Image: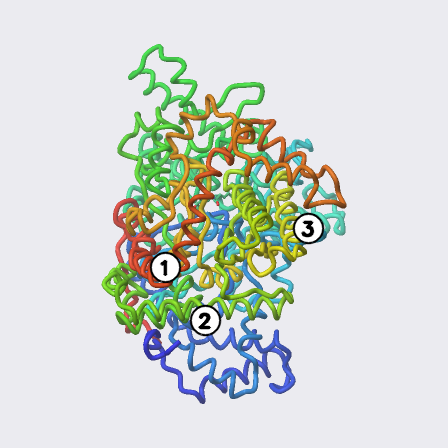
């Protein structure tokens, strides 16, 4: 990339000499190693430390500015931040990319190898966690006074290996070596109290004698470098530990060693990220994690507020708290507890302040993913919070009764408590009732949330419901990930798109410019070659960059329908075998994604993908024309490599089930064309680019609902020979001759159990659409014209746009530029 075009001016110009001295200093003084003998890891740490040196002043200045100006601040509460790597992202934001690469080169170090040394910070499962990471990037770039709060898990999302085609999980020990980006602040630790009548283990309900449990939350701060380095925001992650004065005498009767061993128990709270992203498993430890995040963050927020403000009633004027899904929704009860028990406010005042301070984002429509926690759990661990929740509920239900006297069904449905064999607290109801804003993450999702999931709550609080369509940061997903395309953009329209992605609109006029289209084509080809080279060197797998790169990369889930893609592939395979002369554009179909370890069918889908891939690979009849590949261990870094290389983006969820999707946006801005259903944000992408410029197919969300009553997958099996042949091939063990019968559960899901996600209903339309893709690809002029129109229309999917909407419409937080004189 031409540095001069796309790099911001460094905020603190560092002369070559300074930087080199810093590098040598960090190598020698931090690692006690002579620069020439430093290993890769030592080189990486030293380079990262140099970068941190450069941002330190500005980070301090950002914090000092907020302390002096006392603006309204925003706090983003999220159980997940799927950060990925930070080195390249930070140097680009600081404008020191070129300078640092050059220095490293002159020292004789290998830049790419250094970059690869950094482990991904994988503190999230997928979309929701990555969204949080994009949003803190945008908050810093937009110069908003913001802090992201989360947990510092010792182990992030598991590593995925594929053994004999099966997913095997292994621990992600990302902190094995010290992380150069984090700053531990033990002196700012907070203390959290819970009642303890349950053992802190992953298994439920093991009773122990009643005790009060005190946990320490130790903050670890990570810099969030806004583009241009003007504002450095903070991501504050909590690690659980035991307070230093731990109950030696209290109930261990002087048994020092036992007390010391017990200290470890607290640490388990932040030991590991739960790897489920679509079902809610009621584990005690997960519940404790959620409370720990809420309690630590609110203690910190309130302490900061109190340092600068006398009057509790100013809380909503100084503090906006966004809850990323219901995971931190205990914040409603915790803030009430603080305002009632600590600030000693009356109920009505406390309630008013709580609702005006909090806001809630919903990310799912799947009923099984909605959080509901046993009342028993709160009774045992957080009795005061339960008392508060009951009181909230009573007052709320009494209001509802006034409006709808005698409508007991309605009362039952809106209640914060679900009655039944196990009484449950409905966390979404708590979040909606206890906040001033509830938003979905794409238009269709916000609409379905309002009309289908919580219609009665929406009727009671119509003004609270709103939409904030997701966005992604163009700094990571274009500028850093796709230098080929980023340079082309900057050459065409200048660098302003980096912080104002709507500028891409100007590219629309260039869709008819043959020179520009050629530029797009070359950028895509270069990115494909770059990906193929990387894959060959890391896995030995060879790809042909002249084939269509067709990608479906996301968590494995039935509703996302990796099986639909696979059935389509098998049908193409059969067509090629039957008609060797068939005219078609060669394709490489790539899958990547993790399955929740307890989601057996998702894991079997991975096995099937690998089995199909192996069979196709071994079949000379289709060689060079069709290839299937499952890329193991999908993470942020793999996405950054793969997305720029993609020609086709698969977004094929059953309509009405994918809340938004965000990889769809990344693909769009990177010049891939979308094959998709009318679901989530894909609908808005089609609106922006014109539906004729996407390959849309399949049932709409309404049609899915209408069809459900009478839909019968067997009909498609009986009436469509190609579909029957594909299914028979799977169930005849053609792809798994060594393990007969293993795919029976897939047969059951697709046929015997009624195909809940309606794969077969959409398969025909999907095949027709894929043919259209092949046809268009044969005419590069048309293909790249469409690519240009998509890229030009992708501007609204910047997280800067999304965060600006949150700031203006929900948080009412304004920019607070860091004062120049703050720089020391
Ligand atoms: C809840 C309770 C206990 C254990 C785990 C969980 C849990 C954890 C993570 C439940 C859900 C998640 C993650 C959900 C998620 O990633 N949702 C996705 O959010 C994206 C950002 O808004 C959307 O684009 C996707 O459509 C949505 O699936």
Image coloring type? rainbow
Rendered image: mark on residue 165: 3
Q: Quadrant of the C terminus?
A: bottom left
Compare marks 1 and 2 and give the one earlier in the sequence. Answer: 2
For marks 1 and 3, give the CA distance.
35 Å
CB under 8 Å between discs 2 and 3: no
Rendered image: mark on residue 526: 2
Relative image position of residue 26 (x, y in whole percent) = 55, 80
Secondary element at tag 3:
loop
Instruction: Look at the image and tell me whether residue 400 can be seen.
Output: yes
Front position in the image: 376 or 84: 84
Residue occupying the point 42% across, 50% down:
662
Residue occupying the point 41% across, 58% down:
777
Secondary element at tag 1:
helix
Q: Mark 1 Cα within 10 Å, few/some/many (few <14, many 20+)?
A: many
Residue occupying the point 39% across, 73% down:
94
Relative image position of residue 310 (x, y in whole percent) = 31, 48
For marks 1 and 2, give the CA distance.
17 Å
Compare marks 1 and 3 and give the one earlier in the sequence. Answer: 3
Rendered image: mark on residue 783: 1
Above-or-below relation of 54 to 465: below
CB under 8 Å between discs 1 and 3: no
Front position in the image: 71 or 32: 32
For marks 2 and 3, give the CA distance.
31 Å
Relative image position of residue 511 (x, y in whole percent) = 28, 63
Q: Mark 3 Cα within 10 Å, few/some/many (few <14, many 20+)?
A: some
Q: Mark 2 Cα within 10 Å, few/some/many (few <14, many 20+)?
A: some
Image-based side of 800 in relation to 109, left or right: left
Distance from mark 1 CB to nearest ligand 1 atom below 8 Å = no
Image-based side of 383 in relation to 333, left or right: right
Distance from mark 3 CB to nearest ligand 1 atom below 8 Å = no
């Amino acid at each position: 990339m031409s540095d001069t075009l796309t790099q911001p001016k460094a905020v603190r110009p560092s002369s070559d000499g300074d930087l080199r001295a810093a590098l040598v200093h960090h190598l020698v003084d931090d690692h006690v190693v002579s620069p020439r003998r430093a290993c890769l890891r030592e080189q990486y740490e030293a380079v990262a430390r140099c970068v941190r040196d450069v941002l330190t002043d500005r980070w301090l200045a950002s914090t000092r500015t907020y302390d002096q100006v006392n603006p309204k601040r925003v706090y983003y509460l999220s159980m997940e931040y799927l950060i990925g790597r930070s080195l390249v992202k930070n140097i680009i934001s600081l404008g020191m990319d070129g300078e640092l690469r050059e220095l490293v080169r002159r020292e004789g170090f290998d830049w790419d190898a250094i970059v690869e040394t950094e482990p991904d910070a994988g503190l999230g499962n997928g979309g929701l966690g990555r969204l949080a990471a994009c949003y803190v990037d945008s908050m810093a770039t937009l110069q908003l006074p913001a802090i992201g709060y989360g947990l510092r898990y010792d182990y992030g999302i598991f590593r995925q290996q594929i053994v004999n085609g099966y997913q095997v999980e292994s621990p992600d020990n990302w902190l094995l070596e010290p992380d150069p980006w984090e700053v531990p602040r033990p002196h700012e630790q907070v203390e959290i109290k819970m009642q303890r009548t349950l053992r802190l283990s992953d298994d439920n309900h093991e009773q122990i004698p009643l005790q009060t449990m005190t946990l320490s939350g130790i903050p670890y701060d990570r810099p969030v470098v806004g583009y241009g380095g003007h504002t450095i925001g903070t991501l504050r992650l909590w690690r659980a530990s035991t307070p230093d004065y731990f109950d030696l005498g209290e109930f261990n009767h002087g048994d020092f060693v036992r007390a010391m061993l017990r200290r470890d128990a607290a640490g388990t709270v932040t030991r590991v990220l739960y790897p489920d992203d679509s079902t809610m498993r009621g584990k005690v430890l997960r519940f404790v994690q959620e409370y720990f995040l809420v309690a630590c963050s609110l203690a910190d927020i309130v302490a900061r507020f109190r340092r600068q403000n006398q009057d509790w009633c100013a809380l909503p004027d100084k503090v906006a708290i966004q809850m990323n899904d219901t995971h931190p929704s205990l914040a409603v009860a915790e803030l009430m507890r603080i305002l009632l028990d600590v600030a000693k406010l009356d109920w009505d005042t406390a309630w008013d302040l709580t609702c005006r301070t909090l806001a809630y984002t919903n990310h799912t429509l799947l009923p099984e993913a909605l959080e509901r926690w046993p009342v028993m759990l709160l009774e045992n661990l957080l009795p005061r919070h339960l008392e508060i929740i009951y009181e909230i509920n009573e007052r709320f239900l009494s209001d509802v009764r006034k409006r709808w006297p005698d409508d007991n069904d309605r009362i039952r449905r809106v209640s914060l408590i679900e009655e039944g064999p196990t009484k449950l607290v409905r966390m979404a109801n708590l979040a909606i009732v206890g906040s001033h804003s509830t938003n979905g993450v794409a238009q269709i999702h916000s609409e379905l949330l309002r009309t289908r999931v919580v219609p009665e709550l929406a009727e009671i609080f119509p003004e609270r419901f709103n939409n904030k369509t997701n966005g992604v940061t163009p700094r990571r997903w274009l500028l850093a990930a796709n230098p080929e395309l980023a340079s082309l953009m900057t050459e065409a329209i200048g660098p302003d798109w980096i912080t104002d992605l709507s500028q891409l609109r100007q590219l629309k006029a260039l869709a008819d410019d043959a020179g520009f289209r050629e530029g797009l084509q070359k950028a895509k080809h270069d990115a494909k070659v770059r990906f193929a080279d990387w894959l060959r060197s890391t896995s030995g797998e060879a790809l042909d960059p002249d084939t269509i790169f067709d990608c479906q990369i996301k968590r494995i889930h039935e509703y996302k329908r990796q099986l639909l893609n696979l059935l389509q592939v098998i049908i193409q395979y059969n067509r090629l075998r039957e008609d060797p002369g068939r005219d078609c554009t060669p394709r490489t179909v790539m899958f990547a994604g993790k399955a929740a370890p307890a989601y057996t069918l998702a894991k079997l889908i991975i096995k099937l993908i690998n089995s199909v891939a192996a069979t196709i690979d071994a079949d000379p009849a289709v060689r060079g024309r069709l290839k299937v590949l499952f890329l193991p261990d999908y993470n942020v870094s793999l996405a950054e490599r793969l997305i720029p290389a993609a020609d086709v983006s698969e977004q094929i969820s059953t309509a009405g089930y994918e809340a938004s999707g965000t990889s769809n946006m990344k693909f769009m801005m990177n010049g891939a064309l979308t094959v998709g259903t009318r679901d989530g944000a894909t609908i808005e992408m089609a609106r922006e680019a014109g539906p004729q410029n996407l390959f849309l197919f399949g049932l709409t969300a309404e049609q899915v609902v209408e069809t459900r009553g009478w839909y019968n997958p067997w009909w498609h099996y009986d009436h469509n020979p190609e579909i029957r042949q594909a299914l028979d091939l799977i169930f005849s063990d053609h792809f798994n001759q060594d393990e007969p019968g293993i795919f029976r559960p897939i047969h059951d899901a697709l046929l015997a159990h009624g195909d809940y996600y309606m794969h077969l209903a959409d398969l025909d339309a999907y095949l027709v659409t894929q043919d259209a893709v092949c046809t268009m690809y044969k005419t590069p002029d048309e293909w790249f014209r469409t690519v240009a129109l998509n890229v030009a229309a992708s501007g609204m999917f910047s997280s800067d746009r999304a965060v600006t909407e949150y700031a203006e419409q929900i948080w009412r937080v304004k920019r607070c530029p860091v004062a120049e004189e703050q720089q020391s």
